[in-house]
Amino acid sequence: MSHRHRRSLSIALLAVAAAGLAACATPSASDAPPGASLGSHWPAPPQGDVVGVGTVMDVGGSVELCLGPVAESYPPQCSGLPVQGWTWEGVEGSETSADTTWGAYAVQGTYDGETFTVTQPPVMLALYDPMMIEDPTGGEPGSTDEATLLRIQEEMPAALGDAYLSSSPQDGRLWVDVVWDDGTWQQAADDDYGTDIVVIRSALRETTG
């Protein structure tokens, strides 16, 4: 093979390798088709401990941490994150009916994208001093009309799946609560709908210490 042919072959192989690496790269929200960012990308699980505030529901030994709405029945009902490492020993503030025990707590642990693993004793909400959360809007109202926000709101459950908790239009924006976001879904919402229209709020918060 001539030097010229070897050089051409080397260049071609390098081009194929570069294309393969590009194909394997993790896509960002901006790489998704227009209007489909929220349905195309998921945030990576947090690397350290997080805190979730909600209802711990133990039904026959199967424990969940409910971060969203809770049905006002007796006993109450909700659907949440599967919890590992939970014990009621030494924990106050619970109620029990039949095989169901529940209570409202701030719970610290790790989250792998599916399961919440407790790493610290829970704190009753009545005694919990939450971290101050910065208002991403700066307290200024938005400018999106109610009809547009309601249309976007209808799309959220399908786009976010099980991670969707709740949403509400308020002061010209749609506030959307999800289980966990590291900024990926906020960027995706900005890409899909424009900036300052949808505000994504993560129910799980990274610990500061």
Image (tube, helix red, strand yellow):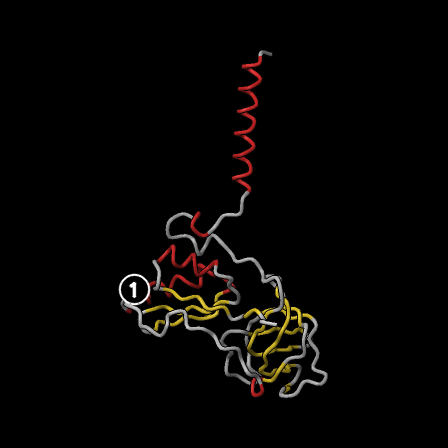
Within 10 Å of disc 1 (Cα), the crowding (few <14, some 14-19, many 20+) is some
Determine the residue located farthest toward the right in the rendered image: 89
The relative height of residue 75 versus residue 193 in the rendered view (above or below) is below
Q: Which of the 4 image quadrants contains residue 24?
A: top right
Report whether 118 appears left or right of 8.
right
Q: Which of the 4 image quadrants contains residue 118?
A: bottom right
The relative height of residue 130 versus residue 113 in the rendered view (above or below) is below
Q: Residue at x 55, y 78 (%)?
A: 54
Residue sitting nearer the eye, 149 or 197? 197
Report whether 5 appears left or right of 29.
right
The C terminus is located in which quarter? bottom right
Residue type at numbered disc 1: Thr
From the top left corner, tell me how far across and down residue 71 is, in percent: 50, 79
The relative height of residue 124 versus residue 208 in the rendered view (above or below) is below
Q: Residue at x 44, y 63 (%)?
A: 157
Q: Residue at x 47, y 74 (%)?
A: 133
From the top left corner, tell me how far across and down residue 4 is, in percent: 54, 14
Label 1: which residue? 148
Residue sitting nearer the eye, 130 or 62? 130
SS at circle 1: helix
From the top left corner, tell me how far across and down residue 43 is, in percent: 52, 58
Residue sitting nearer the eye, 13 or 67? 13
From the top left corner, tell me how far across and down residue 172 is, in percent: 31, 70
Report whether 166 appears left or right of 84.
left
The relative height of residue 100 versus residue 197 in the rendered view (above or below) is below
Q: Residue at x 40, y 59 (%)?
A: 189
Report whether 131 appears left or right of 31.
right
The N terminus is located in which quarter? top right
